[in-house]
Image (cartoon, rainbow, N blue to C red):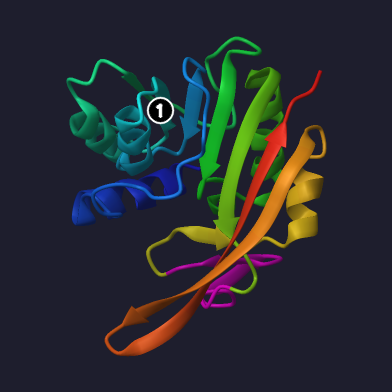
């Protein structure tokens, strides 16, 4: 994990805010629910949640990312930013009514993904919701880079990405009840060329 942390720190130091001014497709959450975002990155999702009136605890194991998130949301009074490992978090059981895991699970190895799933279950309160988003096998980057595990490929920047299929997502969070799962497809144009993008978006609930 130290090498992965270093790779993310270098990426954020070199490129700064990676994903624009705000995040689209934020989940619909009830007012007052305690929200935890895992892998907050530069704070694009956090900023959107704050603009929607929510209070958020944001976690990232990259100090460079956490600083960007903190600076982006400074003064709002609605955000707490913490540098921590999402596989083992310093929060009591059932601390949150919602956990957002958007493009964080896919950067972990298989064993680490299982640890993350266990932490999410531990931290969700009864009736709490998990919002999950990751790239799927249909994405144009699938198969690019050096394969380190099944459906996992290491990019030149030292950051691995795992590409999911729907059954795998259901199995990973089998301790939670599935509310919805969808595969979203769109196209990205870069320098006149079109590339297919594909994500799995799912919502789970802790019912006990």
Q: Is residue 140 magenta?
A: yes
Query: Residue at horizontal 53%, vertical 36%?
Result: 100
Q: Is residue 50 magenta?
A: no
Magenta segment: 139-155
Residue 57 point in image, percent of width and height: 42, 22
Query: Residue at horizontal 22%, vertical 21%?
Result: 76
Above or below residue 191? Residue 207 is above
Query: Residue at horizontal 30%, vertical 31%?
Result: 51
Which one is nearer the viewer's eye here, 135 or 4? 135
Above or below residue 32? Residue 189 is below
- Relative to 144, is 48 on the left or the right? left
Q: Residues within 10 Å of mark 1 (few under 14, many from 20)?
A: many
Residue sticking out furthest to the bottom: 192
Above or below residue 99? Residue 18 is below
Which one is nearer the viewer's eye here, 20 or 71? 20
- Relative to 107, is 122 on the left or the right? right
Question: Which quarter shows the C terminus?
Answer: top right
Q: Is residue 65 visible?
A: yes
Kindly state the secondary structure of the residue where label 1 is placed.
strand
Which one is nearer the viewer's eye here, 141 or 153? 141
User: On the image, which quarter does residue 40 sit in?
Assistant: top left
User: On the image, which quarter does residue 14 sit in?
Assistant: bottom left
User: On the image, which quarter does residue 142 sit in?
Assistant: bottom right
Q: Which residue lies under the disc numbered 1?
A: 58
């Amino acid at each position: 994990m130290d090498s992965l942390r270093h790779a993310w720190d270098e990426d954020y130091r070199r490129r700064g805010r990676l994903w624009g001014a705000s995040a689209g497709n934020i989940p619909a959450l009830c007012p007052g629910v305690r929200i935890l975002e895992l892998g907050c990155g530069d704070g694009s999702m956090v900023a959107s949640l704050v603009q929607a009136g929510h209070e958020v605890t944001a976690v990232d194991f990259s100090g460079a990312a956490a600083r960007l998130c903190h600076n982006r949301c400074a003064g709002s009074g609605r955000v707490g930013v913490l540098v921590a490992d999402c596989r083992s978090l310093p929060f009591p059981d059932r601390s949150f009514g919602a956990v957002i895991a958007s493009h964080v699970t896919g950067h972990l190895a298989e064993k680490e993904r299982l640890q993350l799933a266990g932490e999410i279950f531990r931290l969700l309160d009864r009736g709490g919701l998990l919002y999950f988003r990751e790239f799927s096998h249909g994405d144009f980057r699938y198969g690019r880079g050096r394969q380190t595990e099944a459906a996992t490929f290491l990019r030149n920047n030292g950051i691995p990405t795992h590409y999911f299929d729907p059954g795998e997502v259901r199995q990973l969070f089998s301790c939670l009840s599935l509310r919805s799962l969808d595969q979203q497809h769109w196209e990205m144009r870069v320098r006149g060329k079109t590339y297919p993008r594909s994500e799995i978006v799912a919502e789970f609930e802790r019912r006990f």
